[in-house]
Amino acid sequence: MKEIALHIMDIVQNSITANATLIEISLEIESREDTVSVTVKDNGKGMSREMLMHVTSPFVTTRTTRKVGLGISLFKAGAENSGGSFTIDSEEGKGTELSAVYVLDNIDRPPIGDFAGTAHSLIVCNPAIDFVIRVVIDGREDALDTREVRKVLGQDVPLDLPDVSAWLKENLDEVFPSEYVMF
Ligand SMILES: Nc1ncnc2c1ncn2[C@@H]1O[C@H](COP(=O)(O)OP(=O)(O)OP(=O)(O)O)[C@@H](O)[C@H]1O
Ligand SMILES: [Mg+2]
């Protein structure tokens, strides 16, 4: 059973491949509703209607190295296996939004995993892309928006600079506290 953070890593790779310049990742834990919800939204090249219809099948891919694309179908299956749901919406030239809802208190729900570490890797490995990392835990919302970080640092300071990277990690650890990793 793959951790939710690792699915997010896969799904965001698709956004990067689709030339997104802004990727918004949202994680919401609502214990009263018994849900964990994940949304990934990008402004990349999007998909055709036909691609969108077939994309949740593991036999659809535009990869050339192997025949099956698994990222989206495994993300969908993970959510549905916990009794949750999955939606995807995409428009060519506009972008793509995927959303998975897991049932929090379900034996088949994967643990969240290292969400802060995943977000941090994505930001520092893709310093030209902007990310909005939003976490809501029982109504308490916190977020990190790299566009705001750039405003403070100056547009010419790269986000993968060691000091900046360390500062981003500290902030992401506050946005997503480590006690939720095994949650
Ligand atoms: N955010 C996105 N924007 C545009 N196209 C996308 C996006 N996400 C997926 N796609 C399209 O859907 C296809 C299937 O994606 P999926 O992640 O399931 O498999 P894959 O990326 O092809 O292979 P894998 O994830 O197994 O490495 C991709 O090949 C790509 O053409
Ligand atoms: Mg993929």
Image: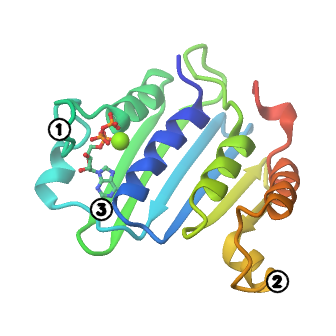
- Image: 71 above or below 27: above
Inspect the image, locate mark 1, and give the three-letter code of the amino acid beneath it: Val
Query: Considering depth in this image, is 118 or 41 the residue closer to the camera?
Result: 118
Residue 48 located left or right of residue 154: left
First along the sequence among labels 3 and 2: 3
- Read off the residue under disc 2: 152
Which is in the foreground here, disc 1 or disc 2? 2
Characterize the local packing of mark 3: few (<14), some (14-19) or many (20 or more) Cα atoms within 10 angstroms: many
Q: In the visual, does 126 lie left or right of 45?
A: right
First-in-chain label (1 vs 3): 1
Quarter in which the C terminus is drawn: top right
Q: CA distance from mark 3 to mark 2?
A: 32 Å
Q: Earlier in the sequence, mark 1 or mark 2?
A: 1
Q: Residue at 63% of width from left, 37% of height from top?
A: 35
Q: Quadrant of residue 148?
A: bottom right
Q: Which residue is mark 3?
A: 90
* Mark nearer the viewer, 1 or 3: 1
Gap in angstroms between the C-alphas marked 1 and 2? 42 Å
Q: Quadrant of residue 150?
A: bottom right
Query: Marks 1 and 3: CB-CB under 8 Å?
Result: no
**Is the CB–ligand 1 distance for label 1 below 8 Å?**
yes
State the mark number for residue 93.
Answer: none
